[in-house]
Image (cartoon, rainbow, N blue to C red):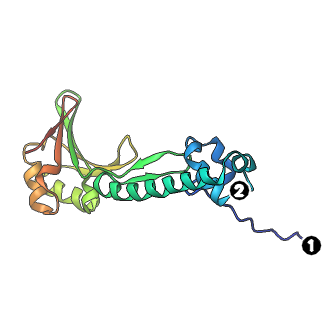
Amino acid sequence: MAEKLQIVEVLYCGVCGLPAEYCEFGSEFEKCKPWLIQNAPDLYPDLVKDSNLKEADKVTDQLQSTSISEGSSTSKKEEVKRLPGGKIKKKDKQEIIIEKVTRNRRKSITTIKGLEIFGVKLTDASKKLGKKFATGASVVKGPTEKEQIDVQGDISYDIVDFITETWPDVPESAIFFIEDGKKVPAA
């Protein structure tokens, strides 16, 4: 008869998101120490010995005050998400980038990135673009593994008006062109 598997409870750090046993290997161990002293004193007994009760209270008060201030600042600034290992993932910027790429000297492709952020289905958008400009349009994965629309030909002359008329949720101030490697506003 096979042995029964036992369920293991894993305690994850409230600061860095790693399992508490691995906090010391993360990039934010100094920030994790107060949380570890309060929530997992058995894992790091040296930390508990080194810190007095007064110091622990001081640090937990600091932790609580920083978590409150961080909550108010994230609503003003860009949304920041913590990934395991201390990596930070920022929320995508609300912008559409239009870039014209030339291939084989005379042929060009217009690339449109960021439409999905405004709730536009890329397959529907590529069909509408293909019909409006009488050209081929398709949804492809870009170099950053995000989907984008590739339209055959240079349609940058009329694309801003078409996007703002077809999808009113997209403001004209959120549309940018890439020209000579620089981001230029469409307006």
At which x and y percent is residue 160?
10, 50
| Kind of residue at disc 1 | Met
Counting residues from the start of the chain, the first of labels 2 and 1 encountered is 1
Which residue is tagged 2? 41
Q: Secondary structure at mark 1?
A: loop
Which of the pair 121/184 is nearer the observer? 184
Q: CA distance from mark 2 to mark 1?
A: 39 Å
Name the residue: 16% across, 58% down.
170
Question: Residue 2: image x %, image y %?
Answer: 88, 70
Q: Position of residue 86 (x, y in %)?
A: 52, 46
Examine the rendered structure and indicate whether residue 80 appears above or below residue 152. Answer: below
Residue 76 sits in quarter: bottom left
Would you name the residue on which mark 1 appears? 1
Q: Residues within 10 Å of mark 2 (few under 14, many from 20)?
A: some
Residue closer to the observer: 42 or 90: 42
Residue 131 vs 90, above or below: the answer is below
Q: Is residue 31 left or right of residue 136?
A: right
Q: How many marks?
A: 2
Q: Residue at x 74, y 65 (%)?
A: 8
**Res. 19 visible in picture:** no
Q: Secondary structure at mark 2?
A: loop
Quarter of the image for residue 12 reads bottom right
Left of 72 or right of it: where is 154? left
Most distant residue in the right direction? 1
Query: Which residue occupies the foreground of this view, 84 or 150?
Result: 84
Instruction: State the residue at coordinates (70%, 45%).
Output: 50
| Three-letter amino acid code at the position of disc 2 | Pro
Query: Which-is-in-front pick, marks 2 and 1?
Result: 2
